[in-house]
Image (cartoon, helix red, strand yellow):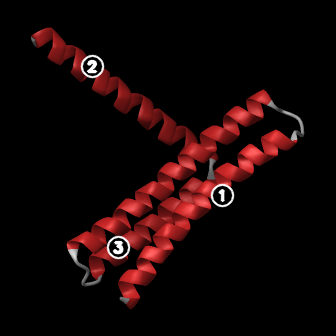
Amino acid sequence: MREFLVGECRRFANTCRWSWAGWRAAWASEKSLRQWSLVNLVSAAAAFALDLAPAERAVILGLGLVVLAAELFNTAIEGVVDMVAPGPDPRAEKAKDCGSAGVALCAIAGGLAWLVILLG
C-alpha cells in the first residue's frame, strides 16, 4: 500500500510539473493566452465584487478557466500543425481555424453567462 501511495504521489508530482511547463511555454509564446488571462482576472474580480449567487460566481469562474484551457489546446494544435505542415496546406489552415473557433465559442459562452447573470 505504501509503495502504491508513493507511486501515485510521484505520478501526481510529475503531472503537475509537466502541466506547469506547458503553461510556462504557452505563456512565453502566446500573446492571446496572456490577453485571456488578463480578461479572466478582470472577470473574476467583477464576479467577487458584485453580489452574485455562489452558483453564478462558479459559472463565471469555471467558464473563464474553460477559455484558458481552449486557448492552450489551440496552442497545442497550432504547434503540431506547424511541425507537420510547415508550408501552406488547406488542411493545416482548417485545423488552425477550427482551434481558433473553439476558443471563440468558449469565450462567447463566458460572455453569454455574464449577460444572463447581469440581465436576469
| Inter-mark Cα distance, 3 to 2 | 35 Å
| Inter-mark Cα distance, 3 to 1 | 26 Å
- Compared across the picture, whether 22 is left or right of 117 comes to right
Quadrant, the N terminus: top left
Q: Which residue is mark 2?
A: 10
Q: Which callout, 1 or 2, points at the residue further toward the start of the chain?
A: 2
Amino acid carrying mark 1 in the image: Ala
Q: Residue 51: image x %, image y %?
A: 24, 84
Farthest-out residue, left = 1
Using the image, tell me which numbered label, if any, was put on residue 86: none
The local secondary structure at tag 2 comes to helix
Give the vertical position of 103 relative to 57 (above or below): above
Q: Which residue is mark 1?
A: 101
Name which residue lies at 44% across and 65% down: 40
The one of 100 and 30 positioned closer to us in this rendering: 100
Of the two numbered discs 1 and 2 in the rendering, the one whose residue sits closer to the viewer: 1
Using the image, tell me which numbered label, if any, was put on residue 45: 3
Q: Which quadrant of the view contains residue 12?
A: top left
Amino acid carrying mark 2 in the image: Arg
The local secondary structure at tag 1 comes to helix
Name which residue lies at 56% across and 54% down: 33
Q: Which callout, 3 or 1, points at the residue further toward the start of the chain?
A: 3
Name which residue lies at 57% across and 63% down: 105
Of the two numbered discs 3 and 1 in the rendering, the one whose residue sits closer to the viewer: 1
Q: Which callout, 3 or 2, points at the residue further toward the start of the chain?
A: 2
Q: Residue 42: image x %, image y %?
A: 43, 72
Q: Residue 15: image x %, image y %?
A: 37, 28
| Inter-mark Cα distance, 1 to 2 | 36 Å
